Amino acid sequence: MAYSLLCFWIAVITLCSAAQGAPSKKQCSDANLAIDGGHYVLSKNYNEGSVLAYRCPHGYFPYPDKSRRCLGNGMWKPSPRKKPRMECRLVTCPDPLVLDNGSVFPNQERYYLNNKTTYECFSEYTLRGSSSRVCQANGKWSGGTPICSRDTDYCHDPGTPPGARRSGHIFNIDDKVKYRCEGKLTLVGSKERTCQQNGEWSGSEPECYYDYTYDTPEDVAERFGSSLKNNLREEEEDQHEKKIRLDKSGNLNIYIALDASDSIDEEHFTKSKEVIKKLIDKISDYEVSPKYQIFFFATKVTEIVNIADFYREKGPTLDEIKDKLDVFEFEDIYVFGLGDDVWKEEIDEYVTHRDGEKHFFIMQDMQELSKTFDEMLDESNSVGLCGLHKDFDDGRQSTIVRRQPWLAKISAPSNCMGSLVTPRFILTAAHCFKFGDVAEGMMVDLGRYREKVKRYIPHPKYNTTSKVHEGIPEFYDYDVALIELVRDVHVSLPISLRCSAYTIKVTSIFLLVCFSSTEQILLKNQYERATFMSPRREPKHVHLKLGAARESCIEDAKKAKNVTVKNARDIVTDNFLCSGGIEPETDYVACKGESGGAVFVERNSRSVQVGILSWGVKNLCTDSNNNKVLSDESSRDFHINLFKVQPFLKKYLGDGTKDYAPLTFLD
């Protein structure tokens, strides 16, 4: 039986703004603490034990000190000085003029933020890595290490990272190369590497870090050599890039250690625990059952969760685990260091070093680590996983779209919304189309892409005029339609109408939204919290009224304009869900342009669609209120319950005789 072992160490050295506390007998002075171009924050004002951290604008770093600590004698360590005065300096990147057998342009004494370098090899040498690089705000060069090599030895030339010096220029079996970093740079990675019989180098590629260098979430996601995926197996074809894959039958053991030292303030320790919970929640999204062991450590290790609990027998100690690592087919130890005072060299000794992988990451703060856990869990080929989605955006449109990549805006020619349910189909409302509308000229906007429409298919029972003679001028029962696109969409992340392994295999992309196997699981409470989206991708929260609460909700349908019937059920059939009003909280109302949009609920970090926006009793929206309008006591919105129109959806989406991949529904 093969096992996979993951170890995570969250070392939190993050500092917060000033907090009140009982003053010590001796306080530290505020003299000479100011920094030109920046500011500082204090963890405990000027009291003993307080940590002062300097903050600079993006692309700058504090010099000559990053932080100070207030000692019991009332002195700061290190001591502030009048000269050199504290200032924010422009970020520089390590010296790239270390390329063997080639040239670097331009040749400069220092390389500052946004400086660009290009690389050329001498004749008979071939360039591997990046031909040009840019100095980034985190103190690292973009791209990969350029290497000029003839590759005539047994192992390839391992190169020399910027800011480093390498000894060893013969690359045959058992030959070694050694690295050191120049000046005030710290080496992260392997100091010594050996050419192995498999043609790969032992250890991991070294890097040289300044004390202000950090890894971005994108760095971590890209460099995460052992990505968490959907099958737990070791890739046979490429050992040096093996990946951990998750499935329901895999064996995954995860150890998490959290620094609980006195230097960690309560606020950031609490945030650390929340990030750990998020990591565990993310892994649980994959419907696997990993076994966890969690430690809090300071000078003494406190066991919180013992992995043996999962086996119902006494578990091994950490030393025993290390002695018996041959039980595991492979093991990985990761460390995430946060903040200003991460002990790079000391910690780097404990992490896993493997060619082509990186296991030690230095990040700015807890928010960046949280974003990383969104980036690093790669669901691209997940099978049997439903409803996974990204939780983080940084305000840019490209990242906002990732939260609801299935969201579609339809020009038909009236403006509506919809949801991508397969690579070929959009789900929306039938009333978005009028008699005589043709597909030519219709467009579907999926955020960064616009797609043409092949045809639209309204529900055959949809007929707005069928009850005019009964006093209902517009009847919206079966207000559902499908839009078939001209081509499959492979660049977006679809919403799924049913959880199934086959469905997800077909799409080959992770799914944001899906249905549970039963309506009762999702719509079981009297007031079920749900959400729909505005065209601006703003969430609008409502409460679906179910059971006894539904009766009073649908009664207000009789207040719709020109409606004269006395029985609300004549207007609102069992095919509708109802929201709006002020109970149990005031709901948002749907506005013009939002018809056809997805109504979804959240379950275990998954968004699950249950309805389609159809019609409302009142129009409370105006151009001036930004379409984010709260309901009044009798304002109601009605949504087609997708569980009631499954036969229609199955007929078209599940048809395996067409030129598009069918969707498999679970009963």
Image (cartoon, grey):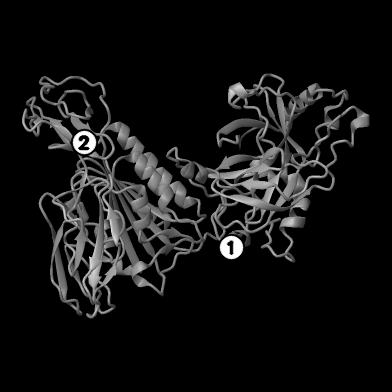
Q: Secondary structure at mark 1?
A: helix
* Residue 598 horizontal/vertical position (percent): 65, 41
- Give the residue at x 42% y 50%: 375
* Residue 232 horizontal/vertical position (percent): 45, 64
Residue under pointer 2: 263
Residue under pointer 1: 505
Under mark 1, the amino acid is Lys
Q: Nearer the viewer, residue 306 or 255?
A: 255
- Give the residue at x 17% y 54%: 95
Number of numbered discs visible in the structure rendering: 2
Within 10 angstroms of label 1, few (less than 14), some, or many (20 or more) residues?
A: some
Under mark 2, the amino acid is Ser
Within 10 angstroms of label 2, few (less than 14), some, or many (20 or more) residues?
A: some
* Residue 366 horizontal/vertical position (percent): 33, 40
Q: Nearer the viewer, residue 169 or 383?
A: 169
Q: Is residue 314 visible?
A: no
Q: Nearer the viewer, residue 577 or 125?
A: 125
Would residue 552 appear left or right of 154 to someone viewing this image?
A: right
